[in-house]
Image: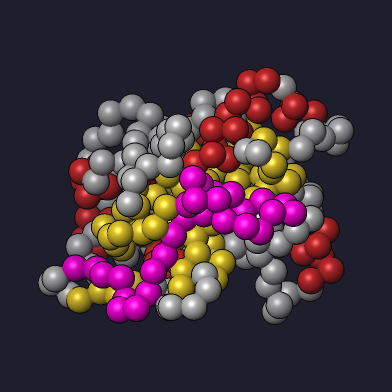
Amino acid sequence: MQQSHSPQLRSAIPIMNNLPEQTDHPLRVDMNEDAARAVVEAVCKATGLIEYSSGAEFKSYDSSFIVADDLILTKRNVADMFSMSVRGIGHFLKYGYSARINSCRVKDRWDTDPSSTRHVTEVVMLHSWFDLALLRIEEGLGGVGPLSLSIADADTVFGSRVVVVGYCSKNPDEDVDIQRQVISEFDSKHKSPGFVDAVQIKTFEGRTGRALGHDSSTLTGNSGSPVVDLQSGSVVGLHFKENTDGLNWAVPSSEIAADTRMIDSGIAFDSVAFAQAGPWETARAVA
């Protein structure tokens, strides 16, 4: 499907107390409505910053979100920072490393609230086709429900109004002044409204498959963010790439929902997911 909206550089909206700041932007006034704010609040509560440590202080990395009481989903490159794989045996935290999800990193707040932080206890899955990581945390975040992944075919969400919640970070290899047009404070929780503008066959890092293109403003650090349909509240994509061919890109949730191993993992879907044939079948067991 082809692009329907012209992507443009728009500032992300800071999140405080799991709600976005009010906006008077003429193209975003719908984000102030109660229904949209309820969806955004649920997404904000379930989205956290991945941090890791090798014995010293924790370092900020990328975004993640809760998909079951004790499971979080993120991109595989995030887990690579603190995990290792042994073919035929499994995946493990590197010796001396620890990792956690921290959902209280917001603008003007840099302390760590224990009630909003959970340590990673297990690397459940590193999926080579979807390039995702499924991590177990010590317990759920109190009162925070998981986000459900949509099983609807990606083509059906073309043109949908979406929001991306995550932690934009500074990329020193790119123009920092331009990045500051998007973000008010790096490494803090922001939301970026937009539209699904494309569902296309794309090739990224040697894998060719369907990708969901959206025009929500994202930066480095948004990798692992949920792309959420504002109408249904379901996750329609796992964000992984920004600013390629004029759009940002996500793994369609419907493809994740078609893989038996993902279905059996216990993550939440918005309806009953059924396994389907696809390139993930031969790739899913590869470490």
The residue sitting at 25% across, 63% down in the picture is 283
Q: Colour mode?
A: secondary structure
Q: Nearer the viewer, residue 284 or 186?
A: 186
| Residue 101 part of the magenta-drawn span | yes
| Residue 118 part of the magenta-drawn span | no
The residue sitting at 68% across, 72% down in the picture is 171
Residue 247 placed where, x, y %?
A: 65, 55
Determine whether 284 is above or below 31 in the image. Answer: below
Q: Residue furthest left?
A: 88
The residue sitting at 69% across, 42% down in the picture is 16
The residue sitting at 30% across, 70% down in the picture is 93
Q: Residue furthest top?
A: 34
Tag count: 0
Left or right position of 265 against 29: left
Left or right position of 130 against 242: left
Left or right position of 164 against 5: left
Q: Quadrant of the N terminus?
A: top right
Residue 84 placed where, x, y %?
A: 30, 75
In which quadrant of the rendered view does residue 100 lie? bottom left
Residue 216 placed where, x, y %?
A: 67, 47
Can residue 199 be seen at all in this image of the molecule? no
Residue 25 placed where, x, y %?
A: 85, 36
Q: Quadrant of the C terminus?
A: bottom left
Determine whether 67 is above or below 110 in the image. Answer: above
Q: Which residues are magenta?
A: 90-117
Can residue 96 be seen at all in this image of the molecule? yes
